[in-house]
Image (cartoon, rainbow, N blue to C red):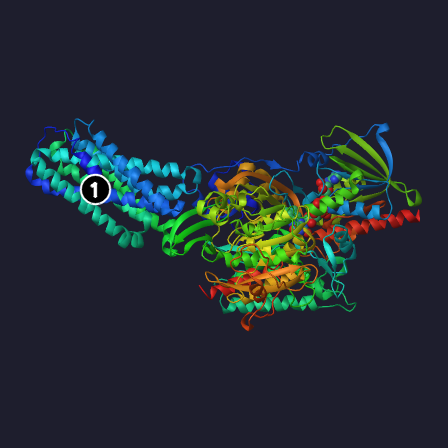
Amino acid sequence: MRIESMSAYEFVIRIPHSAMPMNRTPILFLNVLVIATCGLIYELLAGTLASYVLGDSVTQFSLIIGIYLFALGAGAWLSGFIETELARKFIDVELGVAILGGLSAPLLFLSFAHLSYFQVILYGLVFAIGTLVGLEIPLLMRLLKDHLDFKELVSRVLAFDYVGALAASLLFPLFLVPKLGLVRTSLVFGILNAGVGLWSTWLMRPLIRGSVTGMRVRAVIVIALLAIGVIKADTLTSLAEDAMFADDIVYARTTHYQRIIVTRGRAGFQLFLNGNLQFSSADEYRYHEALVHPAMTLAGRAPRRVLVLGGGDGLAVREILKYPSIESVTLVDLDEEMTNLSRRFPPLAELNGRALEDLRVRVVNRDAMIWLEEPSEPYDAAIIDFPDPNTFALGKLYTTRFYRLLKARLAPGAGVSIQCTSPLFARTAFWCIIRTIEAAGFSVRPYQTAVPSFGVWGFALARVAPFDVPSRAPSNMHLRFLDDQAMSALFVLSVDLGPVPVEINRLDNQALVRYYEAEWRRYE
Amino acid sequence: MNDNQGKSKKAKVKASSLSRRELLAAFLGVPVALAACRSSAAPRFPEGRIVGASDAFGHRLRDGQRVEPPADAWQHVNVVIVGGGIAGLTAAWRLLKAGEEDFIVLELEPVPGGTSQSGSDSSIVPYPWGAHYLPAPMKENAALVELLDEMNVLEGRDADGEPIVAEQFLCRDPEERVFYKGRWYEGLYLHAGQNAVDVAQLAAFNREVDGWAAWRDRRGRRAFSIPIVTGSDDAEVTALDRITMDEWMKERGFNSPRLRWLVDYACRDDYGLTVEQTSAWAGLFYFASRMRVPGDEAQSLITWPEGNGHLVAHLYHKARTKVRLGLAASEIIPTGEGNGASVDVVALSSDGRNAVGFHAQKVIFAAPHFLTKYLIRPYRESAPPDVAEFQYGAWMVANLFLKDRPASVGFPLAWDNVLYESPSLGYVAATHQRGLDRGPTVFTYYYPLCDDDPRAARQRLLEADWKSWADVALTDLSRAHREIRSLTERLDVMRWGHAMIRPRPNFIWSGARRRAVEPFRSIHFAHTDLSGIALFEEAFDHGIRAAEEVSAAMAKN
Ligand SMILES: Cc1cc2nc3c(=O)[nH]c(=O)nc-3n(C[C@H](O)[C@H](O)[C@H](O)COP(=O)(O)OP(=O)(O)OC[C@H]3O[C@@H](n4cnc5c(N)ncnc54)[C@H](O)[C@@H]3O)c2cc1C
């Protein structure tokens, strides 16, 4: 892929008159090898990151390669305007590549947070790195020009260049990504680039007029900076998480409320909140169909107004919007950045069918408990999808007080479904939630289904008036998981999931958080 | 643990003239002061001010400045209630229930509530300036149950007829945590690192408390009951009032440091006294009065973000048209005898400009008891010796307005957050009960001055200016929260000169306070001071009692 760009070099070489001791030339070819490797690594990094974040790897890789090659050409062309002080300029270019290339991955990770700028930063960065890399080889060739004849020069430089490319393309998937992760790979190669710059102050000393101290200091500073990055990156959450999550992180951000992480792997992508898996795109349909449809069918008449508490990923809303009778959906989720992500982050927005853009959907970014204290029009159904109760702040969303507030917001006959953690891993916690909902004055039917990424997962179906469990799945909705039989099967609880004696979860005892902690600790 | 609190000798030095290191050493101890002053950089301060009671009015009274209202500024009223704290507002509430409409409540401050007042100028959450909780009452406390019913705090009765408090008013779990050597732990008693002796002594202490919770006198009265008039006056119980809590603990060999800390903390928290200064009766009262059945958990706590300011708001709302804020009684003059007895009250606006007079049949004196000798004319001339027995502790309360929560190592933020190694009581987070678990918050920081000599404590309190107190609070809290200075956007300080009555030995059962409850001519008394301990329930009870006395007496006439 670099043939076109390399052939362009032949036309832009202009020859300065400089002197270099012959014996250093072979080492200069090592420079070519290193910078060629670095150059390709940056390109691969950008391509990988772009396809992680934006999806559609064919488009992303082809865009990145196109922009990068074009930038190489631009760099080569620009090198023609450099007349004097070639060695000095070469070293400056190296340091520039070191900074931009070295920081490219961390910079791109950081800019995920601001998705609207992400593409601008991505393509801008690729172009800038490409331009600088494009300057390197022509400058080097001109520095070598006086010591080799043209034929030999071209053949050797190009040979080393392609060897470097091969090294990069082998190292990247086989060693660098699995062992170092994207962020450290980019920092380490930045250091290599800066190292070439520093080393060249000795190698090219005879070609440099005046003092080289300033250049060396600068190079050392750049190396130190990137090295700190490598060390710090280890303690920084993003890299720790790189190691923690099996797949690559494509989005990571600490919001005011939680740490949001999206990873992408072979099976699709996953959302983690504070390190806890919220869904995996491979099997979330099982979870969300089971969460939403039983409550929707319970409402009796066709539900018009539906409340969703938690569920900022928009996936429950996607299921709700399948009902033609829906007039409005109110989604209350604490974290604005989460609901924005669900709107704007392409893989998520696609998965939830752009549910949060639907005009019938109103997003309220408030604490659900405090929001519930304020009066509103009654709802025909409520879907409750909070993270598991692993903190006191979350535990309050599973208390009798909470369910009583909810009760006051429901229309007569309204159905409610609640995610209740795993009845297998956290059986006491599961039954604590069930009994708490009962204590708040609901009739409750526990149910469960298997979600491979989670295991056996538990829910509660509740209504103020007693009810029979639904036996019919909604038709004409192209559900992937629920049919009549699967619907009935939801309500079958095997012996090992059966009731256990529990305390009711109240604001003033937070029994649930303590059960949950004790049970999940066994699996950590 | 309080030897770092400069005793009276040190207190003679004016706090504002101390160097920063001396100031912090005096209020937080030498090691903290040295650590805090290690860096030469000037510490950061948020904005803020001293709020609340100005002493100007009190000084005017003490200096004997009196005014005579012009003849046309007098009016007739059946009852004048002096003081719009819990006791005075409760008396008003009770009078209204009895159908008495012709009365007036005089309150010196521009806000009602006295030491239970709260602040509401934060956009995040209202916050307390003093009292912040009320233990759930037992069914025997019928008047209080009635008040809480009226406020919709109760949602019914259990099988035993005990009131059930609605969940949202019970202190939300986690209630307490304690910071010790760099880490927060759940609960108030420090379990981490305890040894077998500590465990055994805690168990033995709990058995002692259980024993007192089970104790009944011949008339079937509990040893320690709320309000305390319903408890026993049997000699076996009152004997406890003659020794200090420290002596009581030593007699039983309780020397486990963490148990002693717990009891000392309880004394400082409830009474502003150390374990060495508190009457053993009062010390045991704290533990045993709130337990229905021996071995039970203590009664749950009822609280609101603004603390007992919520109760104040309700009582004030009921009697609002009767309350005159910013109008203080400056002189109370009983006149006539027998059936013709009445009482004149001269009141002064807090700026001292306007004087008005009331010809009343009855006065309910619901201001702190030490004021009787300045306000009641015959007392001014010769006060009963009992008045001098009423001694008061000084407290500093600071409210810190934070733009975000500080990080915590160990157990997460609770309602009450206590620093094991500090002479302060730590802080209460106002957002906790509101259910706000993220973002800005208000911390109420409590610091009792436990000097032996109450006047020395008061002097130290008042001589430290805003900046000194802000520095003390921030330096103290920075042990647990390094970033507290950068998170605090505002810090207001309240200096309570006469914060609460001190239940030191030989006060509660000496007879002084029982004599002080007796009406003096047409003046009836109602204030928590009359119980010898500062508690909502006691102030409430005295307010009810005084109102009933007055109603009964007027019905007779
Ligand atoms: C820092 C602090 C924390 C506390 N925490 C708690 C707690 O958590 N729980 C609890 O139960 N108790 C607590 N208390 C005790 C509290 O004092 C009582 O609960 C209760 O508020 C006492 O009410 P009171 O009406 O008897 O007295 P006060 O609150 O003293 O009310 C007396 C009123 O009289 C007014 N007054 C004074 N002079 C005059 C005058 N000349 N004319 C007119 N009015 C006058 C005063 O301004 C004041 O408003 C705390 C006290 C303090 C200081």
Q: Position of residue B340 (x, y in %)?
A: 92, 42
- Of B501 and A405, nearer the camera is A405
- Looking at the image, residue A239 sits to the left or right of residue B439; the answer is left
Q: Position of residue A364 (x, y in %)?
A: 58, 44
Q: Kindly identify the residue that appears in the image at 87 percent across and 46 percent down.
A: B99
- Of B339 and A166, nearer the camera is A166
Identify the residue at the far bottom of this view: A495
Q: Position of residue A269 (x, y in %)?
A: 42, 53
Count of residue discs: 1
Q: Residues within 10 Å of mark 1 (few under 14, many from 20)?
A: many
- Of B269 and B93, nearer the camera is B93
Q: Note whether A364 is above or below A402 in the view shown.
A: above
Q: Identify the residue position indicated by label 1 in the image.
A: A35
Chain to which mark 1 belongs: A
Q: Position of residue B382 (x, y in %)?
A: 78, 43
Give the secondary structure at mark 1: helix
**Residue A146 figure quarter:** top left
- Looking at the image, residue A422 sits to the left or right of residue A99; the answer is right
Q: Is residue A407 visible?
A: yes
Q: Is residue B382 visible?
A: no
- Looking at the image, residue B11 sits to the left or right of residue B510; the answer is left
Q: Note whether B263 is above or below B200 in the view shown.
A: above
**Residue B231 figure quarter:** bottom right
Kind of residue indicated by mark 1: Ile
- Of A183 and B464, nearer the camera is A183
Q: Is mark 1 within 8 Å of ligand 1?
A: no
**Residue B293 figure quarter:** bottom right
